[in-house]
Structures are given as structure tokens and as C-alpha cells.
Amino acid sequence: MPGEVLVQMRLATICGSDLHTLKGLRTEPVPAILGHEGVGVVTAMGEPRKKTSEEPNEDRPLEIGDRVTWSIADSCGHCVFCTTYGLPEKCRTVFKYGHAALSNGSGLNGCYASHILLRPGTHICRPAESLPDAVVAPANCALATAINAISSIRPDQCHTALVQGAGLVGLYTCALLVDKGVKRVFCVDVDEGRLAIARRFGATPVVGGEGPYSRAKQTLEEAAPWGLDAVIEAAGVSSLVPEGIRLLRPGGYYGFVGMVHPATQLEGVTGEQIIRKCLTIRGVHNYAPRHLDQAMAFLERTASRYPYESLVSPPFALKDLAEAVSTAEQRQYLRVSVGGGR
């Protein structure tokens, strides 16, 4: 079909949302091939692709043999969300890789396979050859989403920030905030091992104790007695929200990123708090093509600064996917990788 690209998978990584689906915390159509974080090699193409609405002009067209990664969503490029509202990730006919039934199109819809078929509205980019597959694979979900999450934060108005959660999105967010020029970036989590990693990504780790922030409160209030400029929720835990709201200064920014599952009922937050503090509250779900391009550029620019590759496990063979999932559930690695049909 015109615009389609067949990709042989080189490496895929297991995202937290995949684990949520497998545990029944979120519902997806079945049967399906899961997996949306990946990198592969172009093996066949239809007629030349039409560029998506945000694709820049490339130095050369896509070719067979190119190593590529791609956007999590395929968008039409024509509806009001793709154009007027600038939210192609919310396209009226959006298709999400790793979230679709086998009966939807070719069936080659997920990354836990030997091949994946990319649709015409999918944004495709070529990572720098210097970036290992393990560094590239998670970027088309976690890193691109983190870039979207901080995109509306003004550097001139953000000097102190807190990242709630030291998972992969949280670690990326710490590095991005430091790169953005935020002077003091804190990261809070109950897992001290992950907080040690957060320090390597530019954050000041703060250990959460019994109840949200019981041991962290004093540290954060001393650092910003007038309140934090920004808080990014990247833990997927709704009980953290009230303290995050409380810690913000008037006019502060709160970004919801991690709670993409139904068990996210908010308690302990009032409309009065948000109004009286003049807060900006923003929900972030996935990203636009430009954020993926920015993710690739960020990785290339900072590859020697941060230990990206150490966050990903050695690859499991595709036939050992069940073992890979079990390992991911043990949280030894930020991402567990699965090799494609190489």
C-alpha cells in the first residue's frame, strides 16, 4: 500500500503500560501484538510516503536498510486535532502501535514480533548511528512523552522543579529539566536504588517515607520556601497529587503524565487550591512528531553525559517473551528488552 513501510525489528522494550495491560489494569482489544517501543530496519516500502504534517524535509528519502524508530501513533494529518489543535496524538482516526487487535489492518501492529508494518501517517525518523539500539528503543514512548510534558515550561520562570517518580519517564524528565536550565531539580521516590540513578541524571534525590513526602517535605520547603515552580507527576500514583499541588508556588505548573490507567481517582485536592494558586494543570498523553525528533536530537547531544544504555536489560530472545515480562515485573531494570527476528 502507498506509504507503508515494513520494518524488521531489531530491539523492543517493555513499557509499563504493557505490564498494565497484561495485569488487566487497562483494557486493550485482543488478540493483539503488544509493544510500542522499538527500533528496526526498513526491509520493504510501498510507493513514496506522503509526509506527515510535522515532518521536516529530510536530506534524503527513506531507503531500504535504514535503521529507524517511529511514532507510537499513526495519524491522518487532516482532521481538526492533527491541524487546528496541534494534537496529532489525538487524531480522530488515531491508530496506536501495540494497542490494536490483530484484525486491524495487517495484524503486524506491535513490536514483540519479527516485523512491524508502519502505516502511511506514522512519523519515521533515523536515529544517529552512534546511538545503540537499547538507547533508541524506549525513546519513542518515554522520552518523547517527557519532552512533551515539559514543553510548556518557561525556563525564565522555572528555577525549582520536582519530578514525582524515578521510573524511566521520571529520569528522562530530570535530565530534560536540567538541560532546560532549571537550577534545582528534585526527584522523589520510595525506591532508593532508583533515586541513586536519578542523581546520575542530574536530580537531587529525595526519599519518600511513610505517607507521601513525610521525609521529603522539609528538604523541598527549604529549597523553595515560596513554593516549587513546577511538579511533574511521573509515578502513576494518584495519592502523590495533593502534596505536589501543595508544594507549588502561586502560578506554578503541574503536569500529569504517569496515571494512564483507570485507578487514578483524585482525593484531597480542591478546586479552591487550584484557583487561589492560579495553577496551570496539564495532562500529557503521548506526543506529536516534533517531540520524537527532539528526543533523537537530545539523545545524540547528551549520549556521553547520561548512562542511558545501563537502564535497559540485555535482550531476551523473542521466544522468551514470557520470561522477559516476568523480569520486567521484578523492576530490576528500568526497561527490559526483547530481540526481534534477527
Image (tube, grey):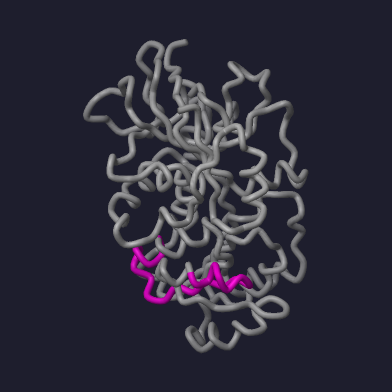
Specify the quadrant that holds the C terminus: top left
Spot occupied by residue 285 in the image (x, y as percentages of width and height): 57, 47
Q: Position of residue 94 (x, y in %)?
A: 58, 30
Q: Was residue 242 drawn as part of the magenta stretch in this picture?
A: no
Residue 333 visible here: yes
Tell me if residue 77 can be seen: no
- Above or below, 305 against 328 in this view is below
Give the residue at x 66% y 21%.
102
Q: Residue at x 67, y 48 (%)?
A: 326
Q: Is residue 146 above or below residue 69?
A: below
Q: Position of residue 300 (x, y in %)?
A: 30, 49
Give whichever of 322, 126 is nearer the camera. Answer: 322
Instruction: Depth check: give the residue in front, 299 or 238.
Output: 299
Residue 182 included in the magenta stretch of the image: yes
Horizontal side of residue 189 vs 148, given as left or right: right
Magenta region, residue range: 176-196
Question: Residue at 66% of width from left, 67% of height from top?
Answer: 241
Q: Nearer the viewer, residue 77 or 27?
A: 27
Residue 98 spot, x, y in % from top left: 60, 33
> How many numbered marks does the figure carry?
0
